[in-house]
Amino acid sequence: MEVTPLTGALGAEIRGVDLRDASENLIADLRDALARFHVLAVRDQQLSPSELSQLAQQFGPFSGNPIHVPLEGQEDVVKMVREADDDGPNIGGAWHMDLAWFKAPPGLTMLYAGETPPVGGDTLFADLTDAFAALSPTMRGFLEGLTSIHSAQDVYATNAAVRAVSVQPDAKAVSKIETEHPLVCRHPATDEPYLLINSTIRCFKGMSEAESRAIVTFLLEHAVRPEFTCRLRWYDGTLGLWENSCLLHHAIDDYAGHRRVMYRTTVAGERPRAAAEAA
Ligand code: SIN
């Protein structure tokens, strides 16, 4: 397995592996690479939706996805087709974490590129461990005491506006969901503290929405500083996999006039642990 880091912060390209019928040793090597680089772009794969699902299950059970209509016969895989003439919003076109309002947000997202534009349609990633480490000790201490209330109130409307996916008929029901997470959590593999920051934070416990918004706005801007990021360029047959609950990602909408087809699945994660708790 050939591993080439993408930037000084995070991300690596992987070559020289075939992920169909991956051995336990290969999965263990990928887990190690994920703990080190957080985002992997495995090039030159040929995965059918069922092979993608089989691979994902080697990392853990499906997280569930109450929002998107899955592929027929493959309930853990969503096919996202952005047609060349689709001038509406793309899916994931803002910094976010997938399903942050779950009690246990997916630990891993996998995205397989079926058809990519000749140029454009890259995805950006930001490392929330680096973002936390770069804050002052006083700010880190203050943030460690905060509990975020994540709200799914905008999830239905945001996804219903995207033509690349269909939304499940009862997806509106999630709008009422609110979930508490510590703002500063422990990375499940490395135990390092990271900021569980996302635009789904409505407020912090014990603070007003206006007070909370000022902090969330600052942290979202801070977390995506260029030195905490990498940019993944997709080619047909690239499998991207990333530690969803410890990163933000952003799909860039710069390929007007071209088709982009991706297959997505998510692997269950663990309930975020507060960094202040004993390891
Ligand atoms: C997503 O955020 O689910 C999609 C990311 C992408 O298409 O690059």
Image (cartoon, rainbow, N blue to C red):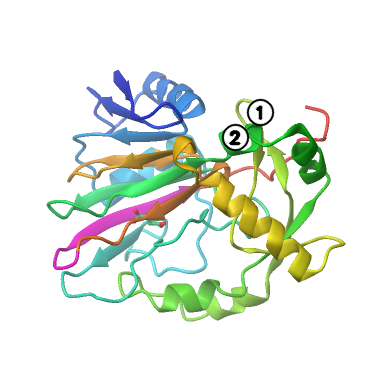
Q: Is residue 222 left or right of residue 33?
A: right
Indicate the position of residue 6 as horizontal and vertical percent values: 34, 29
Q: Residue at x 83, y 60 (%)?
A: 205
Judging depth in this view, the residue of 75 and 2 nearest the camera is 2
161 in relation to 199, above or below: below
Q: Residue at x 81, y 35 (%)?
A: 276
Which residue type carries mark 1? Glu
Q: Quadrant of the N terminus?
A: top left
Do labels 1 and 2 touch, CB within 8 Å? yes
Q: Residue furthest right?
A: 206
Which residues are the magenta region? 256-266
Regarding ligand 1, which quadrant of the image does it lie in? bottom left
Which residue type carries mark 2? Thr
Q: Is residue 265 magenta?
A: yes
Earlier sequence position, callout 1 versus callout 2: 2
Q: Which mark is residue 192?
A: 1
Indicate the position of residue 30 as horizontal and vertical percent values: 41, 26
Residue for badge 2: 129
Tell me if residue 102 can be seen: no
Q: Residue at x 28, y 51 (%)?
A: 49
